[in-house]
Amino acid sequence: MPPAKPLMVFWYEFASTYSYLAAHRVERLAAAAGVDVAWRPFLLGPIFGAQGWTTSPFNIYPAKGRNMWRDMERLCADEGLKLVHPTIFPQNGIMAARLALVGAEDGWIADFSKAVYTANFAEGADISAAETLARLLGDLGLEAGAILARAQTQPIKDRLRTNTEAAIAAGVYGAPAFTVGDELFWGNDRLENALAWATRT
Amino acid sequence: MPPAKPLMVFWYEFASTYSYLAAHRVERLAAAAGVDVAWRPFLLGPIFGAQGWTTSPFNIYPAKGRNMWRDMERLCADEGLKLVHPTIFPQNGIMAARLALVGAEDGWIADFSKAVYTANFAEGADISAAETLARLLGDLGLEAGAILARAQTQPIKDRLRTNTEAAIAAGVYGAPAFTVGDELFWGNDRLENALAWATRT
């Protein structure tokens, strides 16, 4: 039996711009580093709300928001990823997150999560709409109806709540974030650092 | 005559932790890229104040602050820079910034600015104290008394105010920041990106 690979937890929220980049980079970089990735969706809403924010800080602070979009344009161009400015920002990702947790049980969480980010930030689709999510599931060859129903069950709802509580307990205050044991790394910029930490000797 | 090098403006505030890293990286990386650097100190206080903040966001949001200090520990270790948690954070850097602007006239702004950051974040010295600043000037072989007096003159005070207004006009909302023409890059993490932008063909 080969030795177990080190594990990195990837914390993400579907409304988060920089998580779009991280979601499309994490598998390639983690594979190259020899690190396993646990995809863990959570909700930023309760975390931001506890800080008194009712929307994204990128909306609250216009100069910061303008530069974030410009920065995303540059980084997505470097990464070969399309970017549109969604009409609604931030989008409500709660249903997508619950579906991702069904995917965690069934083994398609990574592909589905990447598809949701692409829908949000490359297509400008409404990722809170059941039709959009059903289409994404169908594109993965999955039976959307049954999965949408499972996503509304209490165990899945509880799991998303638990993930968000675990994120807060781990010190997460924004997305994406990465943890290796107790070590927290914040932001797409720290993906490489988190992987290096996971494989340090 | 060799062709003029591209220019990158380095916007920094002496209270800023990540500017400590940037100040100690910018000369080496800019030289390697063939880019000239304009060191431009400014004050974050008026910018934060306009957003309703009376202290650093790292103090306002404790989870963010805790991770910033841990992140700084990791990054400073990678960079071979010492780091202490200053007793006072953020420190008042207005006098240091005015002195740096005297240094911009006389050609020692980079060395002095690095020394102020080292005093603040590697030594935990009080960089608002005239004695500290006089020591740093003396260490550079400069006559502290005359320079401290020049730093209190109206043209220098006006220049710092103008720098801060220019930072706001350039869209700067945090430190460090880098501009290449109209292109704004925020954060120590974007130093390499700004240099690449400056030399793109």
Image (spheres, coloured by chain):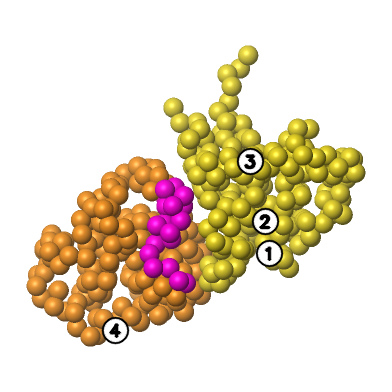
Chain colours: A orange, B yellow
**Callouts 4 and 3 in the same chain:** no
> Which residue was labeled with disc 4?
A158
Separation (CA) of disc 3 from disc 2: 16 Å
Cβ–Cβ below 8 Å for labels 3 and 2?
A: no
Closer to the N terminus: mark 1 or mark 2? 2
Label 2 CA crowd tier, 10 Å (few <14, some 14–19, many 20+): many
Q: Nearer the viewer, residue A136 or A198?
A: A136
Q: Is residue A58 left or right of residue B124?
A: left
The disc placed on residue B15 is: 2
For residue B122, side relative to residue B150 (left or right)? left
Q: CA distance from mark 1 to mark 4?
A: 40 Å
Q: Residues within 10 Å of mark 3 (few under 14, many from 20)?
A: some
Does B134 appear above or below B31? below
Q: Nearer the viewer, mark 4 or mark 3?
A: 3
Magenta-highlighted residues = A51-68
Q: Quadrant of residue A115?
A: bottom left
Circle 4: residue type: Asp
Residue shown at 58%/40% (left/top)? Answer: B166
Work out whether residue A156 can be spotted: yes
Q: Which mark is residue B89?
A: 1
